[in-house]
Image: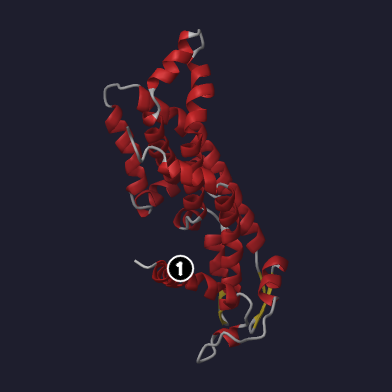
Amino acid sequence: MHPAIRVVLLTLIGLFFLFPIVWVFLMSFQTNETILRIPPSLVFEPTLQNYTALISGRLETGAGVLELAFMQNLWNSFVLSFCSVALSLLLGVPAAYAFARFKFFGSEDIAFTLLSFRFAPALLVLLPLNLYFQDIGLNDTYIGLIWVYQLITLPLILWIVRGYFEDISPDIENAYRVDGHSWFSTFMKISIPLALPGIAAAALLSFIFAWNNFVFALILASADKQPVTVGALAFVTASGIQYGQIAAAVVLSILPTLALALYAQRYLVEGLSLGAVKG
């Protein structure tokens, strides 16, 4: 294929997939009247009132002033996602190493059972979890939500990191232990550094999945504990749907994950490609 044709095709494909994001970004600088104008137009007078309403927490509608807690929702998303991934790394990385290095009775069944939690629909566990959390006092708490988020992050980290540990030759670890080092020292100084790109990739993917979760927080948390995915429902008001504020909320909510992905891009690419070619 001619290089010029390839560039044109790649540009068209990129525009096709990026157009919805660009359109939402443009919507965030428009009023509802401009957004609902027919036919739509790329020419408009930009305004910052959507972002001002989100940051100030006050949205003026036809029915009056609506109090918003978007910035609190944004903070909740960060706390829940970060703490969930941190706990999953603490539990999942050693477990992944154990499944990769030690074969014991039922190991594959246990690993697959943990992975099945990731496949199970959220509605399957929400009702018993809601009743259980009410009994033990974890309903509408950060700790309870972080615990539930392990159904999202822990299986993902466990299975991804396990594959990277399996690709590391045990001879490297054995050579280090021959010098008199303990198993824990070998794990911390040899195994983890070698699998670090894979761990970083798994952590990033888990953070994104946790950040995008909607159902768990909707059922198990009140407004002051809910993330941005649930807090966006506040923009559906009695006076109508606030499309401009929704677009601005989408832009602000994707910025943290976008910044994290750009920062960890090198680890993500290296981690996802690790083990793709085996000799």
Position of the N terminus by quadrant: bottom left
The answer to which of 15 and 230 lies nearer the viewer is 15
Label 1: which residue? Answer: 14
Residue 142: give x, y in percent of width and height. Answer: 57, 46
Whether residue 24 sits left or right of residue 105 in the image: it is: right
In the displayed structure, 178 sits above or below 255; it is above
The answer to which of 190 and 223 lies nearer the viewer is 190
The residue at the point 46 percent across, 53 percent down is 216
How many numbered callouts? 1
Residue 87: give x, y in percent of width and height. Answer: 53, 37
The residue at the point 50 percent across, 7 percent down is 180
The answer to which of 15 and 182 lies nearer the viewer is 15
Q: Residues within 10 Å of mark 1 (few under 14, many from 20)?
A: few
The residue at the point 44 percent across, 68 percent down is 7
The answer to which of 87 and 137 lies nearer the viewer is 87
Position of the C terminus by quadrant: top left
Residue 76: give x, y in percent of width and height. Answer: 60, 53
Place residue 22 in its image quadrant.
Answer: bottom right
Q: Mark 1 belongs to which amino acid?
A: Gly
